[in-house]
């Protein structure tokens, strides 16, 4: 009975795409019979630029929201009508992705407010009432841990929710990994017949430590629980790829 109860809770806690606050973005590349499933904090900005280049769309390279709005999308309910399309996406080590989110969305001081920020935090994070400028990474992780995927901002929501259907079945044909970006980018561009497009180079942010330097044993465990489905589906481990 205990095992059955655990299974019920396991499936109950899985989040379906249509129950999410921010719906996943899919970019239609009809000329190439392909669809890109965008996941924030996983080279999505680079892929949005590449998609614009592929489609010869002139977008504002300094405005991410405007760039995405100018790109053609497909309603996820219509994905079933594109079975002959090549569908792809990229994922990232959950522990590393969360560090990137923290460094990108939480400023060290309330006076640091680039476009899209207010009081030192990204505007989309304000509604949660738990994020603030200068908060420690530990405080950030604990706050994220308490926010379920159905309410989470897209930048820290589980990655599997972006590429699954209502039955949680995988929708994409190829899942690249940011840790293997050069090879996986080339594979996709080769698949699209556009190896003439320059592959972006991903370098660690200046002065940024390796993601493992931000974690304590307790925080490692919290993230492993919060993103257990991503870890299982995509085969990630803590300290993956450290050199």
Image (cartoon, rainbow, N blue to C red):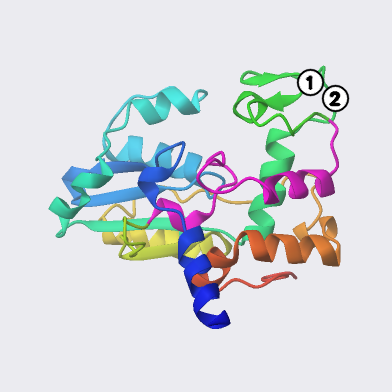
Compared across the picture, whether 100 is left or right of 165 comes to: right
- Which secondary structure lies at badge 2? loop
Disc number for residue 112: 1
Is 142 included in the stretch rendered in magenta?
A: yes
Counting from the top left corner in percent of width and height, residue 108 is at 84, 30
Of residue 111 and residue 15, the one placed in the foreground of this image is 15
The span shown in magenta is: 134-163
- Give the image quarter of residue 83: bottom left
Is residue 225 visible to us here?
yes
Residue that appears at 40% across and 60% down: 186
Of residue 106 and residue 195, the one placed in the foreground of this image is 106
Compared across the picture, whether 184 is left or right of 243 comes to: left
How far apart in space, not on screen, are marks 2 and 1 (Cα)? Answer: 6 Å
Is 2 included in the stretch rendered in magenta?
A: no
Residue that appears at 30% across and 60% down: 171
Counting from the top left corner in percent of width and height, residue 70 is at 33, 26
Residue that appears at 54% across and 54% down: 158
Circle 2 is placed at which residue position?
109
Residue 13, above or below 128? below
The answer to the question of whether label 2 and label 1 lie on touching residues, with beta carbons closer than 8 A, is yes
Counting from the top left corner in percent of width and height, residue 153 is at 56, 38
Counting from the top left corner in percent of width and height, residue 75 is at 25, 40
């Amino acid at each position: 009975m205990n095992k059955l109860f655990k299974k019920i809770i396991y499936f109950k806690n899985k989040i379906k795409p249509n129950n999410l606050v921010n719906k996943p973005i899919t970019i239609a590349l009809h000329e190439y019979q392909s669809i890109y499933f965008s996941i924030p904090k996983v080279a999505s900005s680079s892929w949005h630029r590449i998609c614009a280049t592929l489609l010869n769309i002139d977008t504002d390279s300094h405005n991410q929201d405007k760039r995405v709005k100018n790109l053609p999308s497909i309603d996820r309910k219509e994905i079933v009508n594109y079975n002959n399309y090549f569908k792809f996406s990229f994922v990232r080590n959950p522990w590393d992705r969360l560090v990137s989110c923290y460094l990108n969305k939480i400023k060290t001081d309330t006076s640091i407010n680039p476009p899209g920020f207010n009081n030192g935090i990204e505007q989309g994070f304000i509604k949660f009432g738990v994020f603030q400028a200068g908060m420690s990474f530990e405080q950030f992780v604990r706050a994220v841990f308490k926010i379920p995927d159905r309410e989470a901002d897209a930048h820290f929501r589980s990655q599997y929710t972006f590429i699954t259907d209502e039955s949680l079945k995988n929708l994409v044909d190829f899942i690249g990994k940011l840790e293997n970006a050069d090879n996986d980018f080339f594979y996709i561009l080769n698949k699209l017949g556009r190896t003439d497009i320059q592959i972006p180079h991903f370098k660690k942010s200046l002065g940024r430590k390796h993601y493992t330097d931000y974690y304590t044993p307790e925080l490692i465990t919290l993230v492993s629980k919060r993103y257990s489905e991503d870890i299982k589906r995509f085969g990630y481990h803590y300290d993956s790829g450290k050199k």
